[in-house]
Amino acid sequence: MKITALLVLKCAPETSDPVILANASDVSHFGYFQRSSVKEFVVFVGRTVASRTPPSQRQSVQHEEYKVHAYNRNGLCAVGFMDDHYPVRSAFSLLNQVLDEYQKSFGEAWRSAKEDSSQPWPYLTEALNKFQDPAEADKLLKIQRELDETKIILHKTIDSVLARGEKLDSLVEKSSDLSMASQMFYKQAKKTNSCCTIL
C-alpha cells in the first residue's frame, strides 16, 4: 500500500483550471528518469479529476494499478494518488483530515488564490509519510487490526491452556497410578519389616 501524491486545489466554477494550493509527492519508487514525468502526470490528472468532482462529493478513478481519490468540499478539493490496495475508507479519511488541516492553517485565504502555489506546506509532506500505513488514517481500521491481533493472542492462549489441561489430565492419571503404586509399596514394606522384628 503506497501513497504517491497528495494535492490540495481550489476548484471554482468561474476558473477553467483548478489552482494547486499545495502539492506533495513521493516518486522515489519510480526510475530516476521517469520522476519528472510522473510529477507532471500527477499535476495533470489531479487537475482533471478535481475539476470533474462536483462540490460536496467524493469520487475515485481507477487507472491500471493506481486509484485517484478526490474530495471536493465546497470548492476546496483534496486529491490523493494511491495504489489499488490502499483501502478506500482510509483514503477518504486522509483527504478529509488534509482539508481540515488546510482550513485550520490557512482559513479562507484559498478563495482568493489565482495561480499555483510553489510554497511547500510541511503538513502535507508529513501526512504523505505518516499515512503510508492506512491504519493511521482510519481509526476503525486500526481498531480492527488490534482486535485481530488480540483474537490471535487469545487463540494461542486457549491452545496453550488446552495443552496445559491435557498435561494436567495425564498428571492426574499418573498420580492416581502413583497412589496405587505407593499403597502397594507401603503394604510390601510393612510385610517385609514385620518378619524382621525382634522380641
Image (cartoon, grey):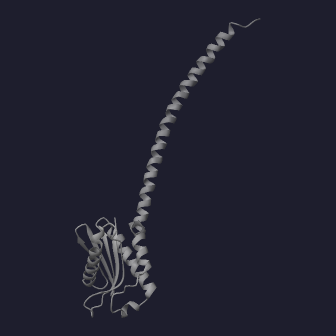
Q: Residue furthest top?
A: 199
Relative to 175, is 164 above or below? Answer: below
Which part of the image, by quadrant, shows the C terminus? top right
Residue 49 versus residue 135: which sits nearer the camera? 49
Residue at (41%, 70%) from the top-left corner? 129
60 with respect to 168 (left or right): left
User: Residue 25: horizontal and vertical position, in percent?
Assistant: 35, 74
User: Residue 37: horizontal and vertical position, in percent?
Assistant: 26, 75
User: Residue 132: horizontal and vertical position, in percent?
Assistant: 38, 67
User: Residue 33: horizontal and vertical position, in percent?
Assistant: 28, 70
126 with respect to 191 (left or right): left
Residue at (55%, 28%) from the top-left corner? 175
Residue 62 versus residue 5: which sits nearer the camera? 5
The image quadrant that residue 150 belongs to is bottom left
Residue 172 versus residue 61: which sits nearer the camera? 61
Residue 63 versus residue 170: which sits nearer the camera? 63
183 with respect to 148 (left or right): right
